[in-house]
Image (spheres, helix red, strand yellow):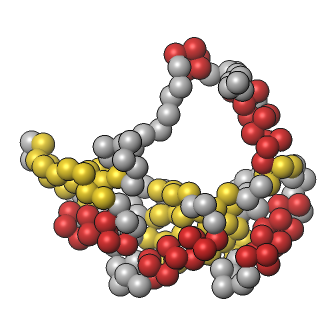
Amino acid sequence: MTQAASPLNELGALVFSHMGFYVRDLERMARFYTDVMCFTQTDQGDLGTAQLVFLSRDPAEHHQLVLATGRPADLGFSVINQISFRVPNLATLRLVRDRVVADPGVTDMLCATHGNAVSIYFRDPEGNRLEVFLDTPWYCEQPLREPIDLDQPDEAIMARAEAIACSRPRFQSRAEWQAGVAKLMGVTAKS
């Protein structure tokens, strides 16, 4: 992949902050994201005809998710490909999996590795796909998805993820890959 350095680097850091999406049942969806995904509701209110709920897991961010009424009842699929959340370790990934599968509105649980990550995928009560993942120390080209058993010991899970990553032609350490992408983006290392 070749691309010119981003002109945004000249404007300063562009950092993703939050996203919003439409829901059918605001109360049910707010409850799912607070009770199951452990977000905190920071605000709520009306904006014109839409009712909004603001949610965050970071005290520095007023909101990371905004739920808004107005999703059509007859929409046959979610236009959101996925919303992804990073966790620090496999124990936390398992904890999230266990909380999620206990919610009767959750469907389509899948545990997988991409070589560069170990992930769970599932659909929230309105069918939006969520990913919760742990980065691995490796890079391999994507897309790649192989099933993985999260009930195995940590060492076995990471060994399988590494073996899958190593089998790919462009395998390298995450640090090597990040340095290459930083160069591609024209980003210099902070001192």
**Compared with residue 64, is residue 152 higher up or lower down, i.e. above or below?**
below
Q: Is residue 143 left or right of residue 14?
A: right
Residue 41 % position (x, y)? 25, 57
Pick whichever, 82 or 52, lies toward us: 52
Residue 163 % position (x, y)? 86, 68
Q: Residue at x 73, y 53 (%)?
A: 142
Q: Which residue lies furthest to the top in this view?
A: 10
Q: Which residue is drawn at 53% across and 63% down?
A: 131
The quarter of the picture where residue 53 lies is bottom left
Image quarter hosting the C terminus: top right
Residue 52 % position (x, y)? 19, 51
Q: Which residue lies furthest to the front in this view?
A: 191
Q: Residue at x 66, y 80 (%)?
A: 150
Q: Is residue 9 left or right of residue 34?
A: right
- Whether residue 8 is visible to the viewer of this picture, yes or no, is yes
The quarter of the picture where residue 137 lies is bottom right
